[in-house]
Image: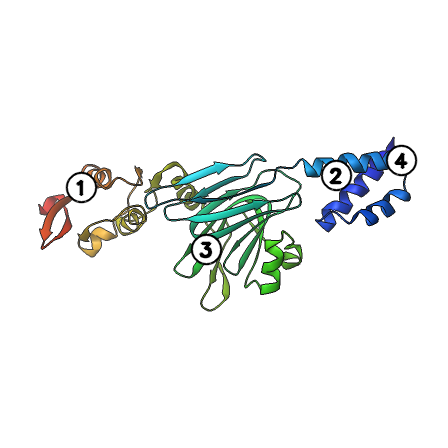
Amino acid sequence: MNWIRRAWEKIRRFYSESRIFRAATQVVAVVTVTSPFVHVALIVYQASLEARPKLSGSLEAGMGEYRCITLSEGTRLCANSGGKLHYNFTNSARTVEVDRGEVSVLAGHDGRPLDLVAGRLLVHDLSTGFVVDRQDRRIHVTVTDGRVRVVAPLDSQSRMKFQRGEAVSAWRGSSDLRKYQQVEFDEATWQLRTLPDATELVLQQLQSWEEGRILLDGRTLDEAIYELRRYQKLPQFEYAPDIGDTPLGGEIVSDSLDAFLEALEYQFHIHPTKKNIGSDEVIVLTHMDEK
């Protein structure tokens, strides 16, 4: 029976290296040099490929929302506030395209490759999880688990191959990125640069939005307000620079300004006062001893 296992492995390797199933005449040529048993194995293997779920659709999160889906082969896709993506899974490949915003990917175990494109940046999955944030003509990639390969700028020919699920030639020879590693691609200059490694805390911050939370640990008040503005339209804030530099902690619901203001007062002794200037509401933040 060893020869059957060896033949099966040759067939499996043949498919995985080509990434597309050959024409019927080429398949027959492969079968004729083996045996009827291998022919049966090939039919079973091809049937298993055809049984892989074909999926296509889109995922979009409106302002203040976050949305996640888990597809039938196990891949989890999430879109943060304002984010939008499209996915297309065929027999031979899984592709995801990011239109805008922040998305996270946790690839399911499957024999098909999974590639994600955002503008002219391509991410090739190597059994992993990663977050892609496309904002203001900059695309930020952080590996949250496992490994990926990143290529940028992607040429028009490689992009066409991506759309057909045949992007293998684009990422071949590129270097791997592992958990904690980050890169940023500037869509204006087409420059890809390596960023300092993320910490475990940064990974937690990046993934907390998938549960509708903002993790305040490791953030200043300035940074927390910036995060809140991603989920809701906020009034203007006025405060001294030293208040903006105040380190915070804990977590808040991403769409709750009131919870944030309560936390500032009772946990960090920063008092909010609301006032109106014309038709605009302004929130003034002061230290409690300055009230």
Return the disc, 4 or 3, that comes first in the chain's sequence: 4
Marking on residue 101: none
Q: How is the image coloured?
A: rainbow
Q: In this rendering, is residue 233 above or below 266?
A: below
Residue type at tag 2: Gln
Return the disc, 1 or 4, that comes first in the chain's sequence: 4
> 143 or 233: nearer the eye?
233
How many C-alpha atoms fall within 10 Å of the one at disc 4: few (<14), some, or many (≥20)?
few
Marking on residue 140: 3
Q: Residue at x 63, y 51 (%)?
A: 165
- Secondary structure, mark 3, is strand
Q: Nearer the viewer, mark 1 or mark 2?
A: 2
Q: In this rendering, is residue 188 above or below 1?
A: below
Marking on residue 36: 4
Q: Which residue, given by chain and number where applicable, does mark 2 sit on?
A: 46
Quarter of the picture holding the C terminus: top left
Q: Nearer the viewer, mark 2 or mark 3?
A: 2
Q: Which residue, given by chain and number where applicable, does mark 1 sit on?
A: 269
How many C-alpha atoms fall within 10 Å of the one at disc 2: few (<14), some, or many (≥20)?
some
Q: Residue at x 21, y 56 (%)?
A: 241
Return the disc, 4 or 2, that comes first in the chain's sequence: 4
Calculate the distance from the C-alpha at mark 2 to the C-alpha at mark 3.
38 Å
Residue type at tag 3: His
Q: Residue at x 70, y 39 (%)?
A: 49
Calculate the distance from the C-alpha at mark 1 to the C-alpha at mark 3.
34 Å
Where residue 54 sits in the image (x, y, percent)? 60, 40
- Secondary structure, mark 1, is loop
> 87 or 135: nearer the eye?
87
